[in-house]
Image (tube, rainbow, N blue to C red):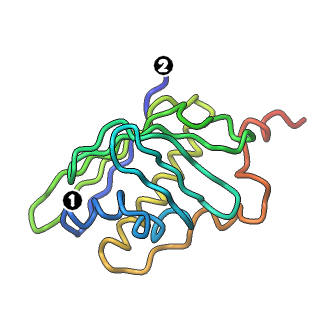
Amino acid sequence: MNEPVVVEIEVAAPTEVVWAFLTDPDELVRWLGVAATLEVHPGGTFRFELFEGQFCSGRYVEVVPYRRVVFTWGWEDQAIPVPPGSTTVAIDLEPRLDQRTLVRLTHAGLDWEMRPLHADGWSRYLERLTAVAEGRTPPDDPSRAYQGARAVPNPLAERRQP
């Protein structure tokens, strides 16, 4: 089994603030996507639109308020070989001194080919989360380069070309 993608970042905001950016659809889309439906309880739906026509979805597995949220993950576009519910994302929040929060995101179950795409994406989106949670303007949305395309590029398809 492949090692999970793990991304950590420290946010200069208390866990309650960071939690809202993970569980409130209006707050989530300030750093990730353009629309979201979140039923934040075990078995509830997790679905967001990264950009027009590009959806990620899954179901909540575990919810520990202000500490941990776990959901299944996948892309609804079949061009990306990570179908909905096929992988798992766990986000742990650890309170730190001075109202800071350590955010640890672990994405498990990705094939080795999909790990670089998701590691890069999560790193960039957690930078955006950090900015909005700290009251700053977030960096550009990394999906902007793909908007207007049919799908996020599949690294496997690029390798297969002669």
Please, what secondary structure does the residue beneath circle 2 have? loop
Which amino acid, by three-letter code, is at mark 2? Met
Write down the residue under mark 1: 101
User: Mark on residue 52?
Assistant: none
> Horizontal placement of 8 versus 29: left or right?
left
Relative image position of residue 70 (x, y in whole percent): 35, 40
Q: Nearer the viewer, residue 125 or 32?
A: 32
Which amino acid, by three-letter code, is at mark 1? Thr
Binning the other alpha carbons within 10 Å of mark 1 as few (below 14), some (14 to 19) or many (20 upward) gives many
Mark 2 vs 1: CB contact within 8 A: no
Of the two numbered discs 2 and 1 on the same chain, state the one appearing first in sequence. 2
Q: In this view, does 117 lie above or below 109?
A: below
> Horizontal placement of 18 versus 86: left or right?
left
Q: Tell me the residue at 69%/40% (across/down).
A: 80
Please, what secondary structure does the residue beneath circle 1 have? strand
Q: Residue 123, located in which quarter of the rendered image?
A: bottom left
Q: Is residue 121 above or below residue 115?
A: below
Q: Which of 82 and 3 is in front in this view?
A: 82
Q: How far apart are marks 2 and 1 (CA)?
A: 30 Å
Q: Tell me the residue at 71%/65% (across/down).
A: 147
Relative image position of residue 162 (x, y in whole percent): 90, 35
Q: Residue 28, located in which quarter of the rendered image?
A: bottom left
Q: Residue 115, located in which quarter of the rendered image?
A: top right
Binning the other alpha carbons within 10 Å of mark 2 as few (below 14), some (14 to 19) or many (20 upward) gives few
Relative image position of residue 86 (x, y in whole percent): 54, 31
> Horizontal placement of 105 versus 65: left or right?
right
Write down the residue under mark 2: 1
